[in-house]
Image (cartoon, grey):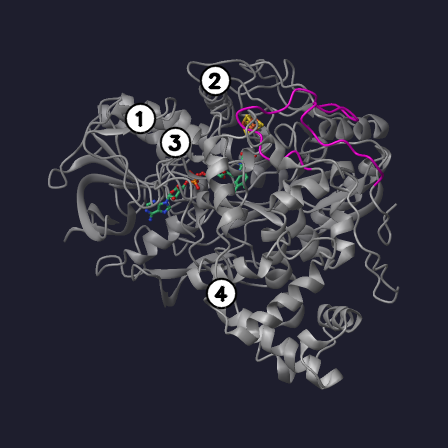
């Protein structure tokens, strides 16, 4: 429904040589503009962890860049209310069809639509992969190897963490040494202390969560004020979303951003190479010429666009000679355990997940499943909490209101559990079309037995820990979080959609650069890995450009 | 947890925070202009009925009063959940997910409400809105347990409609209302001023004071 707060969704803002200055109310920053008729070096579709980071790096290297986003260009200080309903504007709410044995909830559960992508509403948990996961097939016997070396990724994680000013502990208790985080860790909230207490009681390690929100001022942004609305957009700019980090950097380096611009099709020439993108903005379809096209729309929209761009030279969709576009879509198991504490927790305060346990990511003994999981303390806002309560427990009537009356005494632990890549979990085009005439995507997802074993293990372990922390009346909820995969990168053209540089095996001037590249999901939230991987890809593309290997 | 055979304790909800009102912070640093604009609209512009016909709307209200009863509030104070359900359907604003085999949300709501009516007639010989609160509660419990006559449901999965559509839409509206925030002791809007005291049993002066323990719920303390 239309917003009472701003017209960002109705009127384009990045236009006329300027774009919103997200740090100053009413102010603008200059923006370089590119004519549609002149091919830009890179047309980038999407401005999330993949798109905005790549736009900034390529523009900083001197390339001409236009980045498109279907979502609005928000000014957090003016447009973000402390209100869950109003802030639904941040989500991708266009209809998608969801099926399979365990259909995924889409929309606010995993898909953003805004300049800055899903990071505008992400929960800021900023973790690294366990090194072995980059070679999980060779080293751990499941999934697929990534076409990268973990030590290279370790360096890029450090760069990503520096750019996003991650606040975290001096010494992280799991995995190979990493430097201390750039900003000091946040004070633990009562809800985080529940996890800490439970972990100590069970004798497993825990840690303050590395978190993408400022613990000290930076530039025009103030430190986090612990208001706890992070998941629906941070109104103070403490949160280091792409909207306040890489997007301003991209603009400063000369990239152009086009907001409210939905790319519907990638055009290809007679030689089968990409020539530009068709996009819908201000009520009309338009065409931007480009020497290279990068798709960074995340695991559903990226395959959707590639499939919908089928042409005589590429009848099954672009970059799809392997048949793997849209396949191997993954989620994280996101089941939770909740309980009631004697003391008041008031979990609405502060970032919701300030404590983490990665014990079962780094321990292989005692597991009856492949893969790993982390879990974190929780702090859902009222409607978020109520919807999971009613959909899992079916509570209603006075009982429901009384149950919600325990809100300030509740605590919870929620898992981020690795699921296995399966070809049958996929994104396809349905026969139905949306308001712009584009085919609606259809998502099919079913857990495999390994996923279910992991979920059961996590449920038992989290319950044990929450009970050890003193919680009573435990109950459980089921859900999924995050999307990964759908356009796997790899070393073998028959087994992957793109190579280690994100470059399509089939079309040399078409790239994919976002969460859809993941060959495996890992047992941690994906953003830092997407940002690190994008920084790595950016360096490779820049180097190829210097060598004259880019069109 | 919600074992179906226990008799539910239907004593009314009583707030643990009787002297707390989120809206008293309206002019404080806990509210910014964006929040004030959003909440002004919510508090002053209750949408008129446009999507449902009058009869279905009356039934919808009866269903809302059963799933979120507000006996302690006058008509003027009551949170009119049905009005925003109707507005949401009129605007055709989806949630981003349509499960395979389920109709569009507009169609699901229409068929679901009609199925409740048919179930009421089959069981009690009168419409849902005319049943006693106990009968309404028992009927919705049966729907949640799938103990329904499929013929009434026109392909809609009864429990899924009840939990995933009806209850979810209703609580998304109810718990987005300042009156609901106050009754549960939620801090409410918190920008630019957030919180300082984060520890257990600690609170800032602008947070709710718990004056009595939350009421027991079946299975909960
Ligand atoms: C509620 C929530 C909480 C989360 N919490 C965390 C967390 O704590 N830690 C973490 O690491 N991760 C978290 N995530 C996940 C994280 O936000 C995503 O994994 C990440 O943002 C994905 O990056 P991306 O670049 O692949 O896609 P996105 O960030 O989603 O960006 C894609 C962008 O492309 C745009 N787009 C798509 N298609 C088109 C098109 N055809 N034309 C124009 N624009 C298009 C979209 O509008 C969107 O803005 C969370 C996600 C959600 C939803
Ligand atoms: S808790 Fe911090 S990061 Fe979250 S919304 Fe508030 S200020 Fe922003």
- The mark lying in front, picked from 4 and 3, is 4
**Mark 3 burial class by Cα count in 10 Å: few <14, some 14-19, many 20+:** many
**Chain letter for the residue marked with disc 2 in the picture:** A
Mark 3 / mark 2, whichever is N-terminal = 3
Which residue is labeled 1 in the image?
A: A250
**Chain letter for the residue marked with disc 3 in the picture:** A
**Mark 2 burial class by Cα count in 10 Å: few <14, some 14-19, many 20+:** some
What is the chief secondary structure element of the magenta stretch?
Answer: loop
Query: On screen, B68 above or below A56?
Result: below
Query: On screen, B130 above or below A72?
Result: below
Which residue is labeled 2 in the image?
A: A162
- State the image quarter where residue A46 is shown: top left
Is label 1 in contact with label 4 (beta carbons under 8 Å)? no
Q: Secondary structure at mark 1?
A: helix
Q: Secondary structure at mark 2?
A: helix
Asked if the magenta segment contains residue B201, the reply would be: yes
Q: CA distance from mark 4 to mark 3?
A: 33 Å
Which residue is labeled 4 in the image?
A: B49
Q: CA distance from mark 2 to mark 1?
A: 17 Å
Have a look at marks 3 and 2 and say if they share a chain. Answer: yes
Q: Quadrant of the C terminus of chain A?
A: top left
């Amino acid at each position: 429904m239309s917003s009472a707060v701003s017209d960002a969704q109705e009127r384009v803002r990045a236009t006329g040589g300027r774009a919103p200055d997200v740090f100053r109310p009413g102010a603008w920053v200059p923006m370089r503009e590119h004519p549609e008729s002149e091919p830009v070096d890179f047309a980038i579709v999407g401005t999330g962890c993949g798109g905005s980071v790549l736009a900034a790096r390529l523009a900083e290297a001197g390339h001409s860049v236009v980045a498109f986003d279907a979502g609005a260009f928000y000014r957090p200080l003016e447009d973000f209310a402390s209100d869950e309903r109003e802030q639904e504007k941040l989500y991708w709410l266009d209809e998608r069809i969801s099926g399979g044995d365990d259909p995924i909830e889409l929309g606010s559960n995993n898909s953003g639509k805004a300049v800055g992508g899903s990071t505008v509403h992400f929960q800021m948990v900023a973790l690294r992969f366990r090194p072995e996961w980059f070679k999980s097939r060779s080293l751990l016997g499941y999934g697929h190897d990534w076409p990268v070396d973990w030590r290279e990724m370790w360096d890029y994680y450090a760069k990503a963490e520096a750019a996003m000013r991650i606040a975290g502990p001096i010494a992280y208790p799991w995995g190979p040494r990493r430097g201390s985080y750039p900003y000091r860790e946040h004070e633990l909230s009562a809800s985080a202390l529940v996890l800490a207490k439970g972990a100590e009681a069970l004798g497993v390690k825990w840690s303050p969560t590395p978190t993408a929100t400022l613990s000290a001022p930076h530039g025009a942004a103030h430190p986090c004020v612990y208001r706890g609305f992070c998941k629906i957009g941070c109104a103070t700019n403490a949160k280091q979303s792409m909207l306040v980090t890489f997007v301003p950097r991209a603009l400063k380096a000369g990239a152009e951003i086009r907001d409210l611009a939905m790319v519907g099709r990638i055009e290809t020439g007679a030689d089968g190479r990409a020539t530009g993108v068709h996009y819908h903005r201000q009520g009309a379809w338009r065409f931007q010429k480009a020497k290279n096209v990068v798709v960074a729309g995340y695991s559903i929209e990226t395959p959707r666009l590639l499939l919908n761009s089928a042409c005589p030279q590429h009848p099954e969709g672009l970059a799809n000679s392997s048949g793997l576009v849209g396949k191997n879509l993954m989620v994280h198991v996101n089941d939770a355990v909740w309980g009631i504490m004697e003391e008041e927790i008031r979990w609405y305060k502060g970032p919701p997940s300030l404590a983490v346990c990665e014990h079962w990511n780094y321990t292989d003994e005692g597991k009856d499943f492949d893969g790993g999981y982390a879990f974190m303390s929780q702090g859902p806002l009222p409607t978020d909490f109520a919807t999971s309560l009613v959909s899992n427990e079916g509570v209603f009537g006075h009982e429901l209101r009384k149950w919600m009356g325990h809100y300030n005494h509740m605590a919870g632990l929620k898992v981020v559990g690795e699921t296995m890549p399966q070809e049958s979990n996929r994104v396809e085009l349905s026969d139905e079309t949306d308001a712009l005439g584009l085919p609606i995507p259809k998502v099919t997802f079913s857990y495999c037995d390994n996923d279910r074993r992991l979920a059961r293990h996590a449920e038992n372990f989290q319950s044990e820990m929450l009970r050890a922390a003193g919680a009573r009346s435990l109950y459980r909820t089921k859900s999924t979080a995050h999307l990964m995969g759908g356009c796997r990168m790899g070393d073998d053209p028959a087994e992957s959609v793109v190579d280690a540089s994100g470059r399509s095996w089939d079309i040399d001037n078409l790239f994919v650069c976002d969460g859809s590249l993941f060959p495996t999901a890992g047992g941690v939230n994906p953003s830092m890995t997407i940002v690190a991987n994008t920084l790595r890809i950016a360096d490779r593309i820049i180097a190829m450009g210097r060598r004259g290997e880019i069109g | 947890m919600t074992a179906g055979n226990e008799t539910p304790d239907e004593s009314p909800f009583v707030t643990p925070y009787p002297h707390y009102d989120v809206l008293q912070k309206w002019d404080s640093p806990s509210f910014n202009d964006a929040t004030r604009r959003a909440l002004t609209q919510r508090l002053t512009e209750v949408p008129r009925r446009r999507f449902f016909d009058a009869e279905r709307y009356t039934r919808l209200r009866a269903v809302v009063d059963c799933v979120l009863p507000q006996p302690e509030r006058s008509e003027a104070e009551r949170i009119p959940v049905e009005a925003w359900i109707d507005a949401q359907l009129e605007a055709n604003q989806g949630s981003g997910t349509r499960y395979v085999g389920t109709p569009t949300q507009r169609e699901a709501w229409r068929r679901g409400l009609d199925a409740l009516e048919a179930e009421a007639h089959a069981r009690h010989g009168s419409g849902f809105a005319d049943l006693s609160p106990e009968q309404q509660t028992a009927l919705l419990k049966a729907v949640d347990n799938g103990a329904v006559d499929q013929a009434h449901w026109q392909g809609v999965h009864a429990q899924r409609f009840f939990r995933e559509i009806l209850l979810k839409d209703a609580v998304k509206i109810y718990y987005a209302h300042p009156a609901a925030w106050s009754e549960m002791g939620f801090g409410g809007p918190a920008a630019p001023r957030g919180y300082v005291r984060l520890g257990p049993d600690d609170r800032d002066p602008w947070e709710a004071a718990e004056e009595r323990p939350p009421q027991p719920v079946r299975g909960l303390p």
